[in-house]
Image (spheres, rainbow, N blue to C red):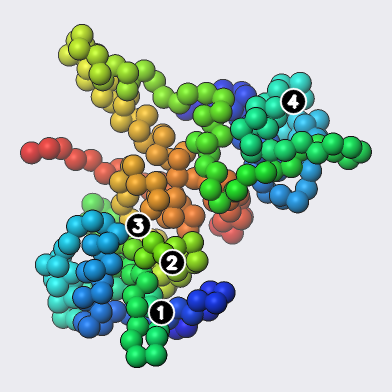
Amino acid sequence: MKLQKATQFGLYAVLELARDPQSQKSAVDIAKKYGISSNHLAKVMRDLGRAGLVASVRGAGGGYRFSGNSKRVTLMDVITIFEELGSDASDGLNSPHRIDIEDALLSVLFEIDEITQATFSSITLDTLLKTIHWRGQK
Amino acid sequence: MIYNQSKLEVHFRPAEPNDLEQIIKLDKQVSGIEKGDYWMERFTQLHGGLGGHIFIAEKQNAESSDLLGFIVGEVRAWEFGSRPCGWIFALAVDPEYRIQGIGEKLFKEISSVFKENGATSVRTMVARKDQLNMSFFRAQGMMGGPFIELEKAI
């Protein structure tokens, strides 16, 4: 599956800041680290700020810091700020005008959507950051 | 084993027959379903040496102890073509004592005996909509495994 660019950038930024909640980083620094557009990331940071996940710090050495609870915020919480996940399967399941083939295909897409959403909803930022440590141990 | 989680002192040990009543009660409180027969059968198998492990977490008072959580599982091999693997069948922690590391400690206790029993991995099954348990198991490092559960209404 592929996430939209804004979603990917939002996840990079929020995880980068949540990794060290005491630190503050500018959008330019984060963009540089991930090799992404700083203009695009600046817009993403504003969306994350409106959602209460990051807070801007003014003054010299200012930037952003993580302002959420990394044990509570899930990947799904971040993703839904930028895009609606899934196909039109769930809408289609309620349609009274379905053709049998369409119906069968929609049920498969619905199954995939449910698994995707359950996966993203069950992984908190803290858990994802811990996987970096677990992967290093392998 | 005694585990001091801030001010709460929790004792972890394998379950005994006289824990059955409290386990059934906590299971009903957490799952909303009373499964007395299931638990009786589990204990019969356990104490008949037919395999399986039940660990409990308890808070000890002056004269009694309160059950705070339990975990149930066993090592199974070659079903579905799977090599020996520790299966977790059930886990519950009293809602008042959650987010204090009790579930994590129960998970570690049972994983440790699974390893002693020859398992190299631990497995469980969680309902897609059960975000609480899925998040818990993911936070222990569990990920989607090599098997997919399939079913059909009959």
Q: Which residue is mark 1?
A: B59
Q: Residues within 10 Å of mark 2 (few under 14, many from 20)?
A: few
Q: Amino acid at mark 4?
A: Ala
User: How far apart are labels 3 and 1 at the CA level?
Assistant: 28 Å
Q: Are marks 3 and 1 in contact (CB under 8 Å)?
A: no
**Residue located beneath label 3 in the image:** B123
Q: Earlier in the sequence, mark 1 or mark 2?
A: 1
Disc number placed over residue A41 in the picture, else none: none
Depth-wise, is mark 4 or mark 3 nearer the camera?
A: 4
- Image location of residue B114, percent across then percent down: 36, 70
Alpha carbon separation for disc pair 2 and 3: 24 Å
Q: Which residue is mark 2?
A: B97
| Closer to us: A101 or A11 | A11
Relative image position of residue B37 (x, y in whole percent)? 11, 67
Sequence-wise, which precedes: disc 3 or disc 1? 1
- Vertical position of residue A58 compared to residue B42: above or below: above
Q: Nearer the viewer, mark 2 or mark 3?
A: 2
Contact between marks 1 and 2 (CB within 8 A): the answer is: yes
Residue, x 32% and y 18% (percent of image)? A91
Q: Quadrant of residue A26?
A: top right
- Kindly give the residue lying farthest to the right in the view shown: A60
Q: What amino acid type is highlighted by mark number 1?
A: Lys
Task: Kindly indicate whether the residue at mark 4 contacts the one at mark 2 (C-beta within 8 angstroms).
Answer: no
**Residue matched to label 4:** A42
